Image (cartoon, rainbow, N blue to C red):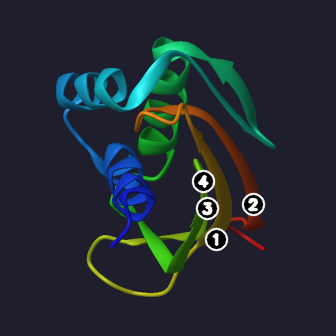
Amino acid sequence: MSDLTELAGRYIAVWNEADEGTRAQAISDQFTADATYTDPLADVQGHAGLGAVIAGARDQFKGYEFKILGDVDANHHIARFQWELVPATGGGNVAIGFDVVVTDGAGRIKGVYGFLDKVPGS
């Protein structure tokens, strides 16, 4: 497993972390202070912005969890992967997305670019 594959797993784990304090620490540990996150619904910078986006998603999708769907494709300091949002108790996905994660070369995330392939209700 490559470092970027492990990083993608830790990134998804942040989205699944229920405890706000633990999640905030993981964001601080894994992201640069000026990290950006951009998807069709959000465009934020910094730990607080990212934390707010994740908290909002967790509030909207209580009882669901994110999982990496398929393999992580990585080169140099960039990883891309597809993810799905599924009920924590099992069942089919309600959302599918595709994220591109750019690191600072030292293992911390400096940018995430997200795309939504399937949204709830579609």
Tell me where residue 90 appears, x and y as whole percent: 32, 83
Q: Residue at x 30, y 70 (%)?
A: 88
Tell me where residue 7 appears, x and y as whole percent: 38, 52
Badge 3 is on which residue?
75
State the separation of the CA atoms marked 3 and 2. Answer: 22 Å
Q: Between disc 1 and disc 3, whose residue precedes?
A: 3
Badge 4 is on which residue?
76
Residue sitting nearer the eye, 122 or 112: 112
Instruction: Find numbered disc 2 in the image and state the secondary structure of the residue it sits on.
Output: strand
State the separation of the CA atoms marked 2 and 4. Answer: 24 Å
User: Dot 3 surroundings within 10 Å: few (below 14), some, or many (20 or more)?
Assistant: few
Residue 37 higher or lower than 113, as above or below: above
* Residue 49 in which image quadrant: top right
Badge 1 is on which residue?
96
* Circles 4 and 1 in contact, beta carbons < 8 Å: no
Residue 21 higher or lower than 19, as above or below: above
Q: Give the residue type that dot 2 points to.
A: Leu
Badge 2 is on which residue?
116
State the separation of the CA atoms marked 3 and 4. Answer: 4 Å
Q: Give the residue type that dot 3 points to.
A: Asn
